Amino acid sequence: MAIAEYDVVIKRDAMSVYDFLLDARNLPSWRSGVHSIELESGAAGSRGAVYRQTIAGPGGRTVCGDFEITEARPGAEIQYRVLAGPERTRGGYYLSTEGGSTRVRFALESEPRGFLARLKSPFRRRMKAEVCQLEQLKSVLEDRAEL
């Protein structure tokens, strides 16, 4: 099992951060590798919503990375699982208030299978790079005058 976690403190209130994260259309603004995303089924931002996304894959080709929201607790957490693509990752954003700011933890876990199972070290590095993109989220949110 591969696990990666990272957290940042963002100078925004928890509901503003939560709302931004819950709107999947915002993913390309802070997660490199996300090319496009659209709601496939369910109510946007709610438990059971399925999103179709295209992401950068191995060798620079575009792959499908569809995911489903499995938990959405306002101002506190958003969990999801990947339904399609080369990796079946589970992940989540966990928020806590710290004064007028919000601590956001991004956690991923996956059980690499097949070819990926033999590439444990590069796979873990890629997962770590994914969660570290929270720094970009912090920049995007703090640079915005108003959410």
Image: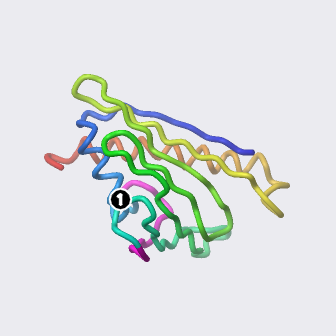
Location of residue 134 (image quadrant): top left
Q: Residue at x 31, y 28 (%)?
A: 97
Tell me residue 129's x, y (percent). Answer: 57, 47
Q: Residues within 10 Å of mark 1 (few under 14, many from 20)?
A: few
> Amino acid type of disc 1?
Ser
In the image: residue 54, left or right of residue 76: right
Q: Does the magenta stretch include residue 33?
A: yes
Given residues 74 and 143, the one toward you in this image is 74
Q: Residue at x 50, y 63 (%)?
A: 68
- Residue assigned mark 1: 29
In the image: residue 49, left or right of residue 119: left
Tell me residue 16's x, y (percent). Answer: 24, 45
Q: Which residue is drawn at 61% across and 75% down?
A: 61
Which structural element holds mark 1? Answer: helix
Residue range highlighted in magenta: 29-41
Relative to 27, is 130 above or below? above
Given residues 8 and 22, the one toward you in this image is 22
In the image: residue 49, left or right of residue 17: right
